[in-house]
Image: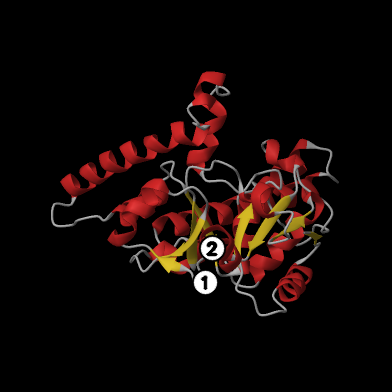
């Protein structure tokens, strides 16, 4: 089910409406509404040519080709990690969480229990400036292709996914006893973690763990209306992001480390440069002679 909003208040009201039955919902923000709900590992399937008839005879899918790559990467990452930190030992799932953390392709798709965190991810990845004197529909020029797209936040019911795919009535935490199941898992599974990671905690992170079925969540569950998609039209991203920042959410809020602080400082610097540029333009426009312009620049 698709919804469209134009500001933060409408977003909050839409979330309340979606959750009116008291269902537990998870949220994920996308900087482009065209992006699909699929993990980075499964996006690699687009690099694999369509299966030949011979492979179909063996009942193989593109997921069967992609999945072993994760196992190989996981073993290599685990080996390197334990060489770097000899006093630490990683379990299989802890290894996947850290791989996701460092940007390695995995079958994990991360969500948040906080709808505002998801909205921040949807809007903050756009290279925008948001000076307070601009109207909400005055979109500044952006630097790359996302400038032409709407953003979106997806809302899913994790309990419904687990019940329909695996007959489970809970969100599970994976331990060693699940390893044989994970090796053969076909359908997505909603999981939680107690892994001690500052980012996961700050982002109220939870995960969908995909199996060998390399199809995005929308294709599986959209018809049953288990997924809601809240679209933020391109012309309202600027205004909504400004409102979200004013509510207290920052990069450091979701990345509680030096990276988050650096992103906030970069954004502050860009906004100061924009303000300085606008100020100079406003002061130079009425002037025609070089002498007066030089005075303004002093």
| Number of marks in picture | 2
SS at badge 1: loop
Q: Which residue is drawn at the image coordinates 81% and 51% (left, top)? A: 235
Q: Position of residue 137 (x, y in %)?
A: 84, 54
Disc number for residue 169: 1
Q: CA distance from mark 1 to mark 2?
A: 7 Å
- What's the coloring here? secondary structure
Label 1: how many residues lie within 10 Å, few (<14), some (14-19) or many (20+)? few
Q: Left of 207 or right of it: where is 14? A: right
Q: Position of residue 63 (x, y in %)?
A: 49, 36
Q: Earlier in the sequence, mark 1 or mark 2?
A: 2
- Residue 68: image quadrant is top left
Give the vertical position of 172 relative to 146 (above or below). below
Q: Which residue is mark 2?
A: 162
Percent of width and height locating residue 66: 45, 34
Circles 1 and 2, Cβ within 8 Å, touching? The answer is yes
Residue 288 visible, this orientation: yes
Pick out the residue farthest to the left.
87
């Amino acid at each position: 089910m698709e919804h469209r909003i134009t500001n933060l208040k409408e977003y909050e009201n839409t979330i309340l409406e979606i959750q009116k039955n008291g269902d537990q919902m998870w949220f994920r923000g996308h900087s482009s509404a065209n992006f699909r709900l699929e993990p980075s590992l499964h996006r690699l399937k687009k690099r694999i040519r369509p299966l030949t008839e011979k492979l179909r005879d063996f009942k193989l899918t593109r997921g069967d080709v992609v999945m072993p790559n994760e196992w190989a990467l996981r073993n290599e990452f685990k080996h390197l990690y334990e060489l770097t930190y000899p006093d630490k030992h990683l379990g299989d799932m802890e290894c996947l969480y850290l791989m996701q953390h460092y940007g390695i392709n995995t079958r994990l798709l991360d969500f948040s229990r906080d709808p505002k965190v998801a909205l921040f991810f949807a809007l903050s990845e756009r290279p925008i400036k948001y000076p307070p004197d601009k109207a909400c529909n005055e979109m500044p020029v952006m630097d790359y292709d996302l400038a032409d797209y709407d953003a979106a936040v997806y809302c899913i019911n994790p309990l419904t996914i687990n019940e329909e795919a695996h007959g489970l009535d809970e969100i599970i935490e994976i331990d060693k006893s699940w390893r044989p199941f994970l090796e053969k898992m076909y359908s997505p599974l909603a999981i939680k973690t107690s892994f001690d990671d500052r980012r996961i905690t700050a982002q109220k992170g939870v995960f969908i763990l995909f199996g060998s079925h390399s199809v995005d969540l929308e294709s599986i569950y959209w018809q049953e209306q288990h997924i809601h998609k809240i679209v933020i039209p391109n012309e309202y991203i600027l205004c909504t992001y400004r409102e979200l920042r004013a509510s207290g959410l920052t990069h450091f809020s979701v990345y509680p480390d030096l990276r988050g602080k650096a992103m906030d400082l970069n954004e502050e610097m860009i906004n100061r440069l924009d303000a300085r540029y606008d100020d100079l333009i406003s002061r130079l426009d009425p002037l025609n002679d070089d002498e007066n312009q030089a005075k303004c620049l002093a």
